[in-house]
Amino acid sequence: MSDRCNFPQLLALNGLRPTPVRLAVLEILGLADRALRAGEILESLRIRRRVNKVTVYRILDDFTARGILRRINLDDRAAHYELACEHHPPHPHFQCLSCREVQCLDPVPLSRMWAEIQGPLGNRADRIDIRVAGHCHKCREQE
Amino acid sequence: MSDRCNFPQLLALNGLRPTPVRLAVLEILGLADRALRAGEILESLRIRRRVNKVTVYRILDDFTARGILRRINLDDRAAHYELACEHHPPHPHFQCLSCREVQCLDPVPLSRMWAEIQGPLGNRADRIDIRVAGHCHKCREQE
DNA sequence: ATCATATTTCAACTCAGTTGCAAGATTAGA
DNA sequence: TCTAATCTTGCAACTGAGTTGAAATATGAT
Ligand SMILES: [Mn+2]
Ligand SMILES: [Mn+2]
Ligand SMILES: [Zn+2]
Ligand SMILES: [Zn+2]
């Protein structure tokens, strides 16, 4: 996933210094094939270096506010994070009720979804979060 | 909202005793015009009687597991709850990024949404949570 | 009345984050 | 180069939302 994103440049564009922790957070998310929790990111970071959790939470908040990352609220208490660069546009997520695994689904245009929903006239949609809960391919076979 | 639901009967159908706290939780949600947080429900309850928060959390969990209520995870840390009886089918929610107000939108059939999303073949969708974030009617006028 | 079961309460705890401030690192100016 | 301003990270203590286990209370059945 990260093969198309230049992280030092991404940070520079946002006026942020390319510190080891910031770069490592981006690299970890770039290599992941799914959205990760703050705790999982922290764990990965600590294999390499000593990091305080507050630093990670602050970096995740900052990146999210700047649109570098997307924060995803699933059923689980902890939020999940994923890269939000142009190669990873917003998309729905599928979570299996049986094995709890999370899959990223193909993007659907905001305009099409907003039209489908027919939200109140006068309201403007800036973002649509879609979370599908169900039973995945594998879990259905096992039954 | 509650005018069409018989709460004592609803509890009886679920093999639950019509206790004052259970009935009050349902009445409060029945009168509300939006999904409420556990804390808001507790506050309303305490106007009438002395209740422990654990009781409320356990009732909300139990009702949710039985499908009497729906738990809605918005951006806020606390979950929101709304009645899930046949007169209140699942529907998308709109949350204004400016005033944080939550609106219930019109229901959209699961099948239509699932088709729109084109989820992975073999996966089965049981539930689709749609959360729209944007700027509401009122807040847009003020600008 | 006696007992079993269902419901509510209490105190203590967990988990995921947040806050304020100190310490360290980086950059810019004199 | 020395200094000061700014940015980044760390530490300790705290918060809010919810959870746990066990005791107390209420309800229903015999
Ligand atoms: Mn994703
Ligand atoms: Mn609603
Ligand atoms: Zn599964
Ligand atoms: Zn608004």
Image (cartoon, coloured by chain):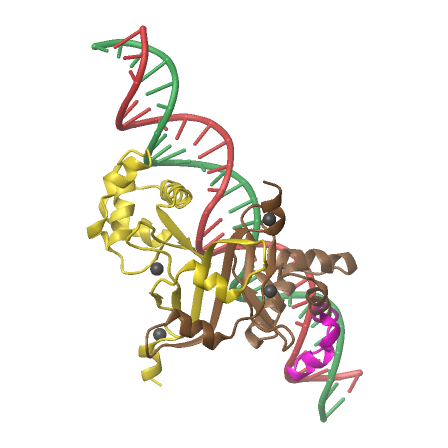
Chain colours: A yellow, B brown, C red, D green
Q: Could one spot residue A50 in this view of the protein? A: no
Q: Quadrant of residue B142?
A: top right
Tell me where residue B120 appears, x and y as whole percent: 33, 73
Tell me where residue A44 appears, x and y as whole percent: 27, 51
Is B9 within the magenta? yes
- Which quadrant is home to the N terminus of chain A? bottom left
Is A62 within the magenta? no
Tell me where residue C24 appears, x and y as whole percent: 30, 27
**Residue occupying the point 28% across, 47% down:** A26
Nearer the observer, A100 or A87:
A87
Q: What's the magenta region?
A: B1-22
Is B23 located above or below residue B141 in the figure?
Answer: below
Tell me where residue D16 appears, x and y as whole percent: 57, 49
Image position of B27 (left or right of A86): right
Q: Could one spot residue B69 in this view of the protein? A: yes
Q: Quadrant of residue A93?
A: bottom left
Image position of B75 (left or right of A45): right
